[in-house]
Amino acid sequence: MHADAARTASALQRLLDLALVWESPGGLRPLTGVADAMRGMPGLASGLRPSSPEPAAAADIAARLAELSPAATAMLRHVDEHGGEGTTGAARRTVSPAEARTPAEELLSRRLLVPREGSTVVLPGEVGLALRGGRTTTEPVDRVPELATASRDAGLVARSAAGAAFDVVRRVELLLDQWSVRPPGVLRSGGLAVRDLKAVAAELHVDEAGAALVVEVALSAGLVAEAAVADGTPSWLPTDEFDVWSGRPISERWARLVGGWVTSARVPSLVGSRDAAGKAWNALAPELSSGLAEEARLLALRVLSDLPDGEVLAAGTGVASLVQRVDWLRPRCPRVFSDLVAAALSEAAALGVSGAGGLPPSGRLVAAGDLTGAAETIAPELPRPVDHVLLQADLTAVAPGPLETEVARRLHLLADIESRGGATVYRFTSGSLRRGFDAGWSSVEVRDFLHTVSQTPVPQPLEFLVDDVARTFGSVRVGHAEAFLRSDDEAALAALVHDPRARTLGLRLLAPTVAIATTPLDVLLPRLRELGSAPVVEAADGTVRVSRPDLLRARSRRGRRPAGAVEARQTAQVQAVATAIRAGDRAESSRPPTAEATNPSAALAALREAIEGGTTVVIGYVDNHGATGERVVDPRRLDGGRLSAYDHRADDVREFAVHRITGVRRA
Amino acid sequence: MNDGPLIVQSDKTLLLEVDHPSAPEARKAIAPFAELERSPEHIHTYRLTPLGLWNARAAGHDAEQVVDALLTWSRYAVPHALLVDVAETMGRYGRLRLEKHPVHGLVLSSTDRPVLEEVLRAKKIAGMVGARIDDDSVAVHPSERGNLKQALLKLGWPAEDFAGYVDGEAHAIDLAEDGWTLRPYQREAAESFWDGGSGVVVLPCGAGKTIVGAASMAHAQATTLILVTNTVSARQWKDELIARTSLTADEIGEYSGAVKEIRPVTIATYQVLTTKRKGVYPHLDLLDARDWGLIVYDEVHLLPAPIFRMTADLQARRRLGLTATLVREDGREGEVFSLIGPKRYDAPWKDIEAQGYIAPADCVEVRVTLPDGERLAYATSDPDTRYRLASCTHAKIDVVRDLVRRHAGQPTLVIGQYIDQLDEIAAMLDAPVIKGETPVKERQRLFNAFRSGEIGLLVVSKVANFSIDLPSAEVAIQVSGSFGSRQEEAQRLGRLLRPKTEGRSAHFYTIVSRDTVDADFAQNRQRFLAEQGYAYRIVDAGDLQSPA
């Protein structure tokens, strides 16, 4: 061990006392299972690695080391510092020291590196020991890495932490208020789209890393969850917990966020960086977590809380020194642990757990796991909620601190928010006031509210604006009716509206001479007649529609074709029929005289004869549908199994398949 | 929690609680770097802008001071991102410097090589710089000094100008403080301008910007070119300079449409300089006519675009901008910053009013209801004629008469946009009208008569908006304005703010037609007034009879 002997002995004694190690006849041995229970990777903490089966003598190894070229020595040290394994690439495995050309070959030939499967080589344990001068580590392990610190006023630490705490609470609230109205969609891979994250960053006036932290913290605190919105798209929505949360005092809200953060496995710091496959991590993506995250945070906070009050991490070097200390405390943890610790520190600052590089009393309680206590401790440091605003003649209202929730909600209804931060600036416009009237406020209520909420007299222009909006508000009214009734006879109209029999018609008097009905016209009209009035129907343009019932008529048929066309078609039809009859006649007349050629070769011969002679023949033909008929044709050509012939009935040249011709005879 | 008067919002606004006991101290601490945006009665709003931070840098403040001021006075924790942003923005100013090099003349140099590389790579800049001298500097042609500064500002790396100024032709100018003295803030303004070299002095209307100009001339002791908005204001400058300085009438020339004199001190109008004939500006020679040692821009917020281009060529001369507001309706504040210079002095209206140098004003908006006939005409009219219809309703004329009667004996101005309406009002009140077509001589006569009290009532069009000194006006009645122009409102109110005898307060009435675009525009203008801290009342025309 590279450590003071006394310290080593006391450490061993402590291990013995804790019964983690026992004295076996062959020396000290760890309790079975202890090594497994310690997480992390073996071999990272110390340089101890399995020795080769037949270790060479230390002196021998030293001699071999001495022979090495500087390049080879450097390489060996590099391998040793980086886990005792490396790859050699093109180096030959079996070479003698004399033939070695590259540093790798030098090492291999002297068996200072031992080849394994593939191109991997390992550093035998005994070589490592020799390299470090017979010790397990190059650096002494009994020296605790110092933290780089600076002194800072404890009050400032508490103030800047409280400022950050207030900011994060405000941002989460603002974010979720936004998402209640316009929730962003959930990516198919489960995260938040980069575009949505950018929008959040712009809305909250933070950079994207800051925005990622805010959404991740909201998630860890259980204030955000996936749910489908009305149209079925999965979206990120505030949970019902959010409503409870936003009603609590700021300090408690903060404690809830911090509690979620400390114990969460999420790693917001990775958002925006790329994974091994080169794909950027999205915020809220389910894979964005690490089993070590919680431990990293707790450890970082614990180390910070070891600093006395008034002492904080030094501005430039503080974080790096703390990471070193944590590495020393957790030597077996993988390298990524250091990154997590550094991230945890910056997150703690952003969340107001730490401030100016140190832990305020509230942060110490968080580190100790006492969230309730932390909330109580930070409460006096946070901006006190105010219940009043300052109204000004330029129609703005300034709340010089966080407004009480109820006042804030009401003011938000009546005025638009112009600027947010520690204070909120509201602006009254006729539009915003009208929104208030729409929500059911009356001008008296608005004035009363303004008077009670304002510390200063309500400026005259604002009162004037309220009255002005009230004056025009509702000066035009819009409603829905199926029909209207108007009459110059006010009494008649009133009588009709109040007639108990007309109750089902939904009549309502709008003015002495106008009433509306919720019943459609076709129902209303007969009912009114039944009630004894004689209504006249008005068309949309105000003209009177005569109420004579419409006589039903069918539509007359549309125009015929011109006579000439019909005639021509008929003539053509007649001619076609005549042609067919004539062809049939010819067939009939010629049927008996000549004998029918019924076998195919005779038929073919008859056809050829007819082609040569240019005579007309009658053929029996099986058509596509399998029906047999006779055609009177003048054969023209015969080839390829097809007969081309003038068909008398069709008055055109047709093609006939020879195999379908059943017989041929002279016409 | 710190009990400071300041609340720093993450959107870079600073809210200052005025009634807080340490508010004055906090105001003093943040004023150099934050722009006062609104100053209503209880909470003043400041905004951190890059220009404001650079102004502070130019005035010698560094990021640490700014951050310290924020942390000291802030009631709640200051958003960390904002502090980082402040430091970063301020760090951008001065990385690049324009300097005089003994061998290469004007050079752009930087201690931060990557920044220099970055800007040199920008296409726009490449054309303006010459040969690379060494790794850290590059030659700049003197004629590109202004353009380069403008372009660098656009890139977000404003250059600090150390190249200095030419002294110009010497000319003895002294303040003649007989029977009057420079007010403390005027002296301060002139001095901080002189120390800074070039820049803008922001003072409210009526606070004596002309005197600041005169004091600066006394510092310069050199020939001076003064650019003003119009001829009447040119005459007023001349009168004022004769009265307040050792200059005599012979030494001061007027260069306008009518007269073209070039003297050691020359007062020119923007209009004559920007007149274009056959595509060239024939009067540009004026700028080179003498070796000017100082150029004064009156009403910087109105500088027309061609003047900016000319100013770009005048970077070797000292430039003083005078204005009541840095707000430009066209948003070219950046050009004022880069071409004329950073803000050198600023005093909020209310402070100067509290010191008794400008009169307090009572602002009242009178709402009239359109008669039914006009209302219908309004509703059915085209959108582009609506404003005119609403502005020129006859209902307003009755109100004007009532108001004039009520303030009988007090010098009263009726201000309007539409000539027909003004003519009608003038006829009804039997008062003289000053409008665009009124000859300058006649205008002068009427203004003089008004000033001396011969005339108690004057109807003026927008020609009177700027730089016309009518210190005796006690009541202004605005019947129509050019849409919602904020600076017009400021100028009109400015007419009234010249100090009054017997500490009487001024009255500013705006007559507005209810439920029309007129009221919408009026709201825009009044918001500006309220933000300047002038609480205004709204009165119904019907209630005017009873004392409101």
Image: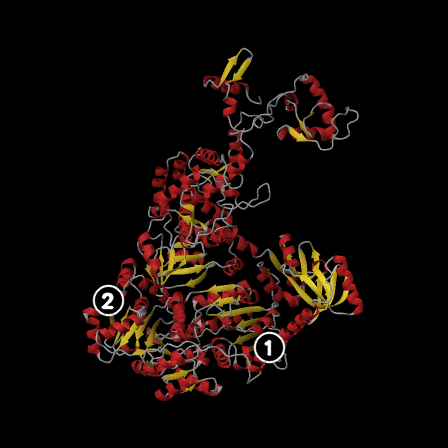
Residue tagged 2: A504
User: What colouring does the structure picture have?
Assistant: secondary structure
Which quadrant, please, contains the C terminus of chain B? Answer: bottom left
SS assignment at label 1: helix
Instruction: Report the mark closest to the observer, 1 or 2.
Output: 1
Work out how far the residue at label 1 is from the one at label 2, CA to CA, in angstroms: 66 Å
Q: Is residue A407 left or right of residue B231?
A: left
| A448 over A401 or under it: above or below | below
Q: Residue furthest front?
A: A593
In the rendered structure, find residue A569 and report the number of the disc placed on it: 1
Q: Position of residue A250 (x, y in %)?
A: 36, 46
- What's under tag 1, amino acid-wise? Arg
Q: What is the chain identity of the residue bearing mark 1?
A: A
Q: Position of residue B276 (x, y in %)?
A: 60, 80
| A307 over A37 or under it: above or below | below
Of callouts 1 and 2, the N-terminal one: 2
Q: Is residue B57 left or right of residue A616?
A: left
Residue closer to the observer: A229 or A361: A229
Q: Is residue B274 left or right of residue A186?
A: right
Q: Residue furthest right?
A: A612
